[in-house]
Amino acid sequence: MTIASVRPYPFIQKDTVDKFPAPLLYIGWEDHLMFTAPFCLPLPPTLKFGDLLAGPLPGVFGAHPDFAKIDWTTAEWFKSGMPWTPDAEKTLAENGLAHKDVIRFRTPGLNGLNGSCN
């Protein structure tokens, strides 16, 4: 964030990666209003993206009835709002994910509870 100041402004960022047990990653599921905002998860940069899909994501989004129906090969991914294609065999770091990045996914054909998000 850019700061304009008329004199020196000693801004010390308080949420740097060294202050967390692991880098934070925000993950949201498009069109599913049961989850109103992306979840913030502390995830090691060495975690493979495929392991994210099999481990943490079911724990976070698994309560939604659509989750069991997801075909991950058709999921559309976005990183900071731009289309993005992760590699399931690479780590989060190798996929270019860093502290406080935001990723979202859309699951074509799965549009929330009875399509209630439309």
Image (spheres, rainbow, N blue to C red):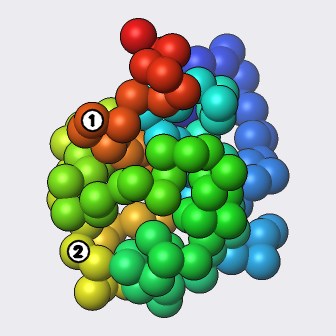
The quadrant where residue 62 appears: bottom right
**Vertical comparison of 112 with 73: above or below:** above
Task: Say what amino acid the circle numbered 2 marks.
Answer: Asp
Left or right: where does residue 118 sit relative to residue 43?
Answer: left
Q: Quadrant of the C terminus?
A: top left
Image quadrant where one finds the N terminus: top right
Query: Image point 26% across, 51% down: which residue?
Result: 75
Q: What count of labels does the image hold?
A: 2
Do callouts 2 and 1 mark residues in contact (Cβ within 8 Å)?
A: no
Q: Position of residue 8 (x, y in %)?
A: 72, 32
Give the farthest residue toward the top.
118
Residue 61, disc: none
Query: What element does badge 1 sit on?
Result: loop
Give the camera-side residue of 37 and 25. Answer: 37
Left or right for 22, reference 110 = right
Mark closest to the chain's N terminus, 2 or 1: 2
Would residue 24 be visible to someone looking at this image? no
Q: Position of residue 98 (x, y in %)?
A: 47, 65
Where residue 87 sits: x, y (%)? 23, 74
For disc 1, the neighbor class at 10 Å (few under 14, some 14 to 19, many from 20) is few
Residue designated by label 2: 87
The residue nearer to you, when weighing 65 against 19, is: 65
**What residue did someone put label 1 on?**
109
